[in-house]
Image (spheres, rainbow, N blue to C red):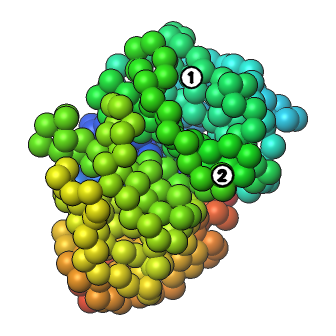
């Protein structure tokens, strides 16, 4: 993603999501990982001074999403000829004022596809700390004022991780554990680290194969019932986020990029299009509820809200019934290829193409309608 594309993404996705609704957006796809901003009051048009709270230049490249925590917008980027300079930047969510910048040297492999960047994974936060993860498999923990708390060079600890396309799986936080998923042909594992010390709480070896999907957390009624979903191209496993113990497994061909989405006890897995599974803490094997191959999400993760599921396959948006998988409608999106997961707010979907086009689509049970387009560059 170009610098202009990232700047545009900050101007809309952060300033408008954070400032208009004063909400927090603590990790990839939001705090609850559903890519839904229910309480936001997002505008239906913007640009040329209209409905743009602020805009700021960035250094280097980034394919990560911004997060919002403690009134701050946190962004990661990577720079240098080898993209071995890792940046974490903080802006005031209301004004866009630069609050602090931190820079680190990558300790692991920095080769990646030119469509991506070493700063591809989206950072995460537990409300007190920021966990910035990079394609070099460096995991940085800072407090909200930018002070370094701990640093793990996982590429140095496990030198066989990494692939030529780069890594992009984003970390998640469950209680006192930050969880990362690293899957490549040379080495593959998921691991949980203590949020305070960075010490390894658990490490679970995975099949040696490339994948770029991100873990997701199913929130239970109590923290002891929380579960973390780890998806690879050969299946989905469910783990205790604090010990790494495997609780359940679903063996099937799954997407290597799009990530699973949980809604209560239902998990929507990018597998054969979308496969809906029922899972609770007492189950050793998830129950298959339905499967629909026309709901193929490609690289964008599915969004589930108010009984509907939305998937984007590069240029096509498809809406389905979340209860049974029945396709309601589909439409072609304008101008470009869509790789990033959209944001849903109310009855409007905000989508951003690789080429830098922002599109707002009004959605209901019968159709999707483009109501706004804007070239961000």
Label 1 belongs to which residue? 140
Looking at the picture, does residue 97 appear above or below residue 246? above
Instruction: Kindly tell me whether residue 286 is visible in this rendering.
Output: yes
Residue drawn at 32 percent across, 39 percent down: 240
Residue drawn at 66 percent across, 56 percent down: 209
Label 2 belongs to which residue? 208
Instruction: Answer left or right for 136 relative to 274.
Output: right
In this view, which residue lies farthest toward the left? 221
User: Residue 109 at what x, y percent from top left?
Assistant: 78, 35
Where residue 233 sits, quadrant-wise, is bottom right
At mark 2, the secondary structure is: loop
Residue drawn at 80 percent across, 51 percent down: 164
User: Residue 371 at what x, y percent from top left?
Assistant: 40, 75
Structural distance between the alpha carbons of marks 1 and 2: 25 Å
User: Residue 189 at what x, y percent from top left?
Assistant: 57, 42
Residue in the foreground of this view, choosing between 252 and 132:
252
Category of crowding for the residue at label 1, using alpha-carbon neighbours closer than 10 angstroms: few (below 14), some (14–19), many (at least 20): many
Proximity of marks 1 and 2: CB atoms separated by less than 8 Å: no
């Amino acid at each position: 993603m170009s610098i202009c594309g990232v700047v545009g993404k900050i101007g809309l996705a952060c300033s408008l999501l954070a400032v208009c609704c004063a909400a927090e957006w603590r990790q990839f796809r939001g705090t609850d990982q559903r890519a839904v901003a229910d309480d936001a009051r997002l505008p239906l048009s913007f640009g040329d001074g209209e409905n743009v709270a602020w805009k700021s230049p960035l250094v280097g490249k980034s394919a990560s999403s911004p997060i919002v925590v403690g009134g701050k917008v946190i962004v990661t980027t990577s720079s240098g000829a080898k993209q071995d300079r890792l940046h974490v930047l903080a802006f005031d969510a209301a004004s866009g004022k630069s609050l602090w910048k931190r820079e680190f040297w990558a300790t692991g492999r920095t080769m990646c596809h030119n469509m991506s960047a070493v700063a591809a994974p989206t950072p995460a936060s537990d409300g007190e700390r920021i966990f910035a993860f990079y394609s070099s498999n460096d995991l940085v923990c800072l407090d909200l004022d930018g002070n370094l708390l701990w640093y793990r060079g996982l590429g140095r600890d496990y030198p066989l991780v990494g692939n030529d396309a780069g890594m992009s799986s984003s970390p998640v936080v469950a209680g006192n554990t930050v969880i990362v998923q690293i899957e490549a042909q040379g080495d593959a594992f998921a691991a949980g680290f203590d949020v305070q010390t960075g010490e390894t709480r658990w490490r679970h070896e995975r099949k040696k194969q490339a994948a770029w999907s991100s873990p997701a957390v199913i929130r239970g009624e109590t923290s002891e019932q929380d579960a973390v979903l780890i998806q690879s191209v050969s299946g989905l496993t469910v783990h205790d986020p604090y010990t790494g113990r495997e609780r359940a497994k679903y063996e099937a061909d799954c997407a290597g990029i799009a990530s699973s989405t949980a809604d209560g006890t239902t998990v929507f897995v990018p597998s054969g299009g979308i496969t809906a599974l029922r899972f609770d803490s007492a189950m050793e094997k998830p129950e298959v509820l339905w499967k629909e191959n026309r709901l193929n999400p490609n690289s964008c993760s599915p969004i589930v809200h108010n009984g509907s599921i939305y998937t984007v396959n590069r240029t096509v948006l498809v809406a389905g019934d979340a209860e049974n998988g029945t396709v309601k409608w589909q439409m072609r999106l304008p101008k470009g290829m869509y790789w990033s997961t959209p944001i849903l707010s109310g009855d409007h979907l905000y989508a951003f193409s690789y080429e830098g086009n922002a599109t707002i689509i009004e959605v209901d049970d019968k159709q999707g309608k483009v109501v706004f387009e804007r070239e961000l560059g």
